[in-house]
Image (cartoon, rainbow, N blue to C red):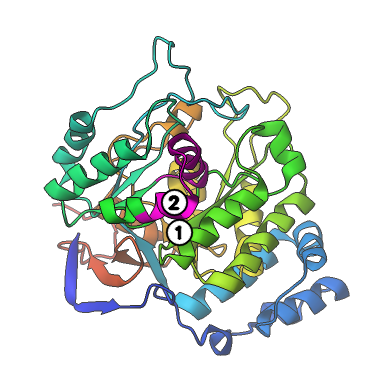
Amino acid sequence: MTSDSSEAWTSSIIAAGHDTDWKNNIVVTPLISRIINPIISKIIKKVLNGDRISVHEGVTLYYECDLPTLGHVANLLKKSRFGDYVFFNRNLHINHTNICVLACKFCAFRRGPKADDSYSLTIDEYISRIEPFEEIITEVHSVGGLHHEWTISHYENLFRSAKSKYPNISIKALTAVEIQHLSKLSNISIDVVLTRLISAGLDSIPGGGAEILVDEVRDQICKGKETSSEYLEIHRAAHELGIPTNCTMLFGTVESTMHRIIHLDKLRTLQDETNGFQCFVPYPFLPDKSRLPQAQLATANEILRMIAISRIMLDNIPHIKSYRMNLGDNVGALALLHGADDIDGTVGNEEIMHIAGSTTPLNKFDADLALLIEGVGGIPVERNTNYTYFSKYRRQQPPDNKGLPMAHS
């Protein structure tokens, strides 16, 4: 793939590349007039008028609207913001340690410090993970366990070393619970942790660890992690310091649909106040090697329904990601027709999802990723970490026969 510099543009961190006049761009198609259920028709008309729907209306829509209609509405909302653009960036996942003081039931990645397969990357080992991809990637995405010995000084040294060698590679690192752990271990406030990490080279924060932002669910699947309010307050602190963040949802464990919609409502409430979330990343639980036997692998219908309702509910968060690493290529592509506008293009060493059961290859980049996007009618656009720089991509030497096999004499 090659970048077309004549088709590049910039945006502010808050706008994150979306059309801020999106409500006036919504196109109501004839399909909407064919909805028979009067309750669903009323809710969808409200959505397509650009109005916010309530938690109760979100639950009703989730349960009673058929998937084709729900996906169609979510796709209309996506197109009103981005047209046919589908965004990706070139990032490398580095999971710096699997040693963790917690033992969340849903986590297949965590190890105790004495486990035979536990590991903690040295700074040199961390840097060596980047080196093979330094000419390819624009971002390092780095999360891991809650190491019992690593204080904030370790991460300051880590980020400074990475930035010193690779100043043009953005560092997106540390979930809310990792930041809280550093605060407690180093005996400093959350604000001080964040300020020191920014000075060391941290650019943005991923949204991992949200799971379900309802404490009765968290008590069952990740007791000991930050509470729902603590997760939100850590992200609030980051936003107030000018650090953009993502937010996530892990669904398909023990939560109800109501819990999921409450989760979305809590995220959009904070976003109303801070405007710091750039992307929402919903992904289903992968149960292969965890300790939650009551949890079941989400169906494709459920995954697509969740992505669609996320786009509808989160009217103030610009992007919805299709987390291909978790969903796989087929469902990941379908998600782009159900409200998602961003797809991860991860290369290299990702471990957390793959230990949990993901089989998605990590080297599907360039032409393959463009084909996946174009296959659902999208236009591939490379972005930077913070959604402030964009460039359309074109595959080199595109076929002149619209993909049909060539006849040979």
Left-right relation of 46 to 177: right
Q: Which residues are magenta?
A: 174-195
Image mark for residue 137? none
What kind of residue is marked 2?
Pro
What kind of residue is marked 1?
Thr
Residue 336 in view in this figure: no
Q: Write the residue at 68% across / 85% down.
A: 49
Along the viewing direction, whichever of 392 and 367 lies nearer the viewer: 392
For residue 183, above or below residue 99: below
Report helix, strand or loop for mark 2.
loop
The x and y percentages for residue 189 are 48, 49
For residue 407, above or below residue 84: above
- Which mark sits nearer the N-terminus, 2 or 1? 2
CB atoms at circles 2 and 1 under 8 Å apart?
yes
Main secondary structure along the magenta-highlighted residues? helix
**10 Å crowding of disc 1: few (<14), some (14-19), many (20+):** many
Report helix, strand or loop for mark 1.
strand
Q: Write the residue at 38% across / 72% down.
A: 13
The x and y percentages for residue 202 are 31, 53
The x and y percentages for residue 293 are 69, 23
Q: Quadrant of residue 254?
A: top right
Residue indicated by mark 1: 245
Q: Quadrant of residue 288?
A: top right
Q: Quadrant of residue 284?
A: top right
Q: Write the residue at 15% across / 38% down.
A: 132
Residue indicated by mark 2: 206
Q: Residue pushed farthest bottom?
A: 24
Residue 99 in view in this figure: yes
Q: Write the residue at 21% across / 35% down.
A: 129
